[in-house]
Image (cartoon, helix red, strand yellow):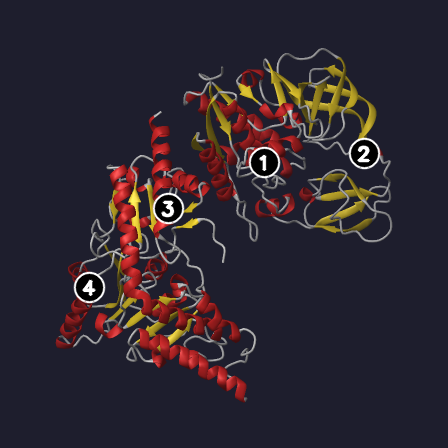
Amino acid sequence: MKITSIYLDHAAATPLDERVLSAMQPFFTEFFYNPSSPYAPAIEVRRAYEAAKQVLAKQIGAKSDELIMTAGATESINLAFGNIKGHVVTANIEHHAVLEAAKLRAHTLISSDARGYVTADSVRAALRPDTELVSIALANNELGTIQPLRDIATVIKQEREDRLAHNNTTPLYFHSDASQGVGQLDINVARLGLDMLTINAAKIYGPKQMGLLWAASHVKLSAQIVGGGQERGLRSGTENVAGTIGFARALELATEHRVYEADRLRDLRDSLQERLTAAFPEAIVSGHPKHRLAGHLHISFPNIDGERLLFSLENRGVLVATGSACAANKGTRSHVLTAIGLPEKVADGSIRLSLGHLSTKENIAQAGQIMIEEVRREYDRVSR
Amino acid sequence: MNQKIKVYVGMSGGVDSSLTAALLLEQGYDVTGVYMKNWTQDLPGMICPWADDLADAKRVAVQLGINFKVFDFENEYKHKVVDYMIEEYKRGRTPNPDIMCNQEVKFKLFLETSLEEGADMIAMGHYARVEDGVLKQAVDTNKDQTYFLYRVTGQALQKTLFPLGEFTKPQVREMAKARGLYTAAKKDSQGICFVGKVGIRDFLSVYVEQKPGEIIDKSTGRVLGHHDGAIFYTLGQRHGLEVGGGLPYYVVGKDMDKNEVYVTTDLNDDTLWKKTVGLASIHWINEAPVSGTYQIRVRHRAPLVSANLMLNEAGVELDLSNAERAVAPGQSVVIYNGSICVGGGIVV
């Protein structure tokens, strides 16, 4: 594998792990059979598929017949919302997949605080007697802020008890999109108090277009894609066997290395953050200082143009993200940065750095140096 | 030496305007890159890639370390260029939106906005030369774009730089490559910018209702077939007639009221060839020329042909030394005096 640039956008996409690729490979060629076919080799494929789902289920503390495999997280989210007719509560910093699904229904958007943190109290305040779904991501994709899902689950549990006491039979489900925290955080659906969970493989060195929805057995879902009745009739279409095998292997590997990798990334991230904030005291780091994904660093350089910075870094071989395209592209400023109340001058100078497997002590040090040079160059130009 | 001269360069995200900015910077100008956001229409299956073009323009500006801005001319462009074009087609004419864009947007609105913001001059990546407000053909005569510039004023040109006018297109590619410009190998855009790659017919279909009409053989009066709107046909056109068999048919005329298209197989048909051409909506870049012999061009990249020019009350009457094929109403004819582009007018 040859990657010449310094990649600092692991939150957008990750390279497939070689071990994941090896696990998947035979299922493209040798074990290509349709898992629904009756002959022996196909049955073997079916077994491998079921085994992979069991691995996935085990990793999140669930049962494999509660998983519905989907083509990515967005589809999983659409499935989670699909049967909801009543009111929905979610946060104004959620991913577009959740926001757009919420907008199709009666909904309340909770405001996060300036750190991108959604408190349990704010969820409590937004609940209505007809609320059927609360959907809060495990971690925010731009800021890396990790949400207090257990506290929110407690609020939801209380609400359910209240409803029982008042003969309100409206069901209330708690869903979380964990696309951004999976593999980095310990996810156990029972411990987190969830009814539904979305995860995907693309952010954990697995294949793209591979996700799943876990839904507890009491949750009523309705199929969004109908056909041959695969996945308990909830998601028709021939099973993506290779993808599921890869997903399982990727999640297994992520779990195996989770603690070590999180420590490693946190050290690298913190050193980069310290270096940049020391060089530019005016820089603003967003996200929760404590509850933040280990590889995430969202930093804003007031009065410079984040997109310019992205291009100049790209020119030097450093790939980063900007949630906020230039002010000239009006209307495309990140909704997350607006939601947490960053002034435009700050928001427009933002870049998101997300570290991962491709990050090393050397290339992070090098990236830090390049960033300092390029940010300085931009500040010099602006002040000319 | 040019240090204090502030130049706003129109950067489209293509190789020509990228190199234009680079050259001016090297010549010591104080350069600001500006992307003009003009009106675009996303048509099914074909998206005008303006967002990518904007990003490319900005990438090059960042590479060069120059300031970069976006001027949003969407409304004005739609009003002055797109609506004009659609109206002209509805009248059965064949307009040229690029000429209108230069007249109304690039060398008027863009110039005025740039000057208001403190620029001393503007620059464009056109293949043309300016000397003291006089427009001259580019050194690369094959690439020369003065045809599109004949409706620009001398005053505007006084404030305009065309650094590419001295170079050939291959040289420009080479120079862009040598400087490592991000857009050095980018393909040139095709067709009318806001129409994208779909072609004028698909574009017009969005705005004009299709109305079936007859395709009639001019000499026999016989109905040969049907079309879905006379508006979609232009003089001299051969393709898209869907009249099968035998010799190819060419459009020799149309009646917009009757919605009829007239065709012929006779390549020598009188209507296809014009030896005298009347022009209206005359525009002279500087002072009006005197009557006499000039060179004219009836479309972009067409060879120059000699013509006798007579000024009259209606405009200009041209007597061509050789008849020209398919000179359609609405089309521009541009007049040259040697290498100098004098101006021109629109075929009546």
Task: Mark 4 vs mark 2: give the one in front.
Answer: 4
Same chain under badges 3 and 2? The reply is no
Labels 3 and 2 touching (C-beta < 8 A): no
In space, the residues marked 3 and 1 are separated at their CA atoms by 28 Å
Labels 4 and 3 touching (C-beta < 8 A): no
Q: Can I make out residue B74 in this image?
A: yes
The residue indicated by pointer 1 is B177
In the image, what residue type sits under mark 3? Thr
In space, the residues marked 4 and 1 are separated at their CA atoms by 60 Å
In the image, what residue type sits under mark 4? Leu
Q: Nearer the viewer, residue A358 or B108?
A: A358
In the image, what residue type sits under mark 1? Lys
In the image, what residue type sits under mark 2? Thr
In space, the residues marked 4 and 3 are separated at their CA atoms by 33 Å
Q: Position of residue B253 (x, y in %)?
A: 76, 38
The residue indicated by pointer 3 is A322
Q: Tell me the element at label 2.
A: helix
In space, the residues marked 3 and 2 are separated at their CA atoms by 59 Å
Q: Position of residue A377 (x, y in %)?
A: 37, 32
The residue indicated by pointer 2 is B271
Disc on the earlier residue, 2 or 1: 1
Q: Tell me the element at label 1.
A: helix
Labels 4 and 2 touching (C-beta < 8 A): no
Task: Mark 3 vs mark 1: give the one in front.
Answer: 1
